[in-house]
Image (cartoon, rainbow, N blue to C red):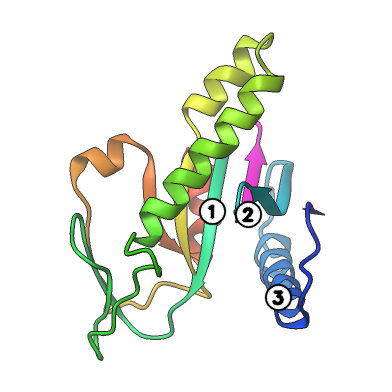
């Protein structure tokens, strides 16, 4: 694991430390896991990508959120806490999925500039998955409905506990 940027505030450093520990605990329990490289807290413009998971055949750009209760997600509508109805959208009105898709695009743009000469790596960037990851897991009563276009664009919503499975299937 590599931390790209150390946060300035104590609260942000604690959150990053907890994410490192969660990821380490998750991946250290899996036997026969192919080698992987994890980069945390990647600065991209005015925002940060929480996690980039790189394995031989897959790149997953992930933003992590802690939602202890069930959520309701439907393409084109605000994301909500299922119990309270509270909006989970970001302060600018966008959804967490829009945010991670934009961060993936920014990361791909940055990497493609340095990988222009390498055709194989360019194809890997085109297949990069953008995932919203609920920690420690997506509540089982959550209701999630994505459009087929979201799936075609490799946009995912899953629990942290499902991340190794996504990496293995991709």
Asked if the magenta segment contains residue 53, the reply would be: yes
Q: CA distance from mark 3 to mark 2?
A: 15 Å
Asked if the magenta segment contains residue 66, the reply would be: no
Using the image, determine if residue 1 lies above or below residue 68: above
Given residues 169 and 46, the one toward you in this image is 46
Using the image, determine if residue 54 lies above or below residue 41: above
Q: Which residue is mark 2?
A: 51
Q: Are marks 3 and 1 in contact (CB under 8 Å)?
A: no
Q: Which residue is mark 3?
A: 12
Magenta region: which residues?
51-58
Residue 57 visible within the image: no
Residue 44 visible within the image: yes
Residue shown at 32% from the left, 77% from the top: 140
**Mark 3 vs 1, N-terminal side:** 3
Q: Quadrant of the N terminus?
A: bottom right
**Mark 2 vs 1, N-terminal side:** 2
Where is residue 99? Give x, y as percent. Answer: 43, 54
| Mark 1 neighbour density, 10 Å: few (under 14) some (14–19) many (20 or more) | many
Q: Which residue is mark 1?
A: 62
Q: Quadrant of residue 164?
A: bottom right
Q: Quadrant of residue 15?
A: bottom right
Where is residue 58? Give x, y as percent. Answer: 56, 35
Using the image, determine if residue 98 lies above or below residue 11: above
Looking at the rendered structure, which numbered label has been put on residue 36?
none
| Helix, strand or loop under label 3 | helix
Q: CA distance from mark 2 to mark 1?
A: 5 Å
Q: Are marks 2 and 1 in contact (CB under 8 Å)?
A: yes
| Mark 2 neighbour density, 10 Å: few (under 14) some (14–19) many (20 or more) | many
Q: Are marks 3 and 2 in contact (CB under 8 Å)?
A: no
| Helix, strand or loop under label 1 | strand
């Amino acid at each position: 694991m590599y931390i790209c940027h150390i946060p300035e505030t104590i609260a942000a450093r604690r959150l990053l430390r907890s994410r490192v520990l969660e990821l380490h605990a998750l991946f250290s329990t899996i036997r026969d896991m192919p080698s992987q490289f994890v980069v945390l807290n990647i600065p991209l413009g005015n925002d940060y990508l929480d996690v980039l998971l790189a394995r031989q055949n897959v790149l997953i750009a992930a933003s992590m959120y802690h939602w202890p209760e069930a959520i309701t997600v439907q393409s084109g509508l605000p994301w909500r806490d299922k119990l309270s109805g509270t909006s989970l959208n970001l302060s600018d009105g966008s959804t967490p999925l829009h945010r991670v898709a934009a961060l993936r695009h920014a990361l791909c743009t940055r990497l493609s500039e340095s990988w222009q000469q390498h055709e194989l790596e360019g194809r890997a960037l085109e297949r990069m998955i953008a995932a919203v990851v609920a920690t420690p897991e997506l509540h089982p009563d959550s209701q999630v409905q994505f459009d087929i276009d979201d799936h075609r664009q490799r946009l995912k919503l899953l629990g942290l506990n499902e991340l190794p499975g996504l990496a293995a299937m991709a």
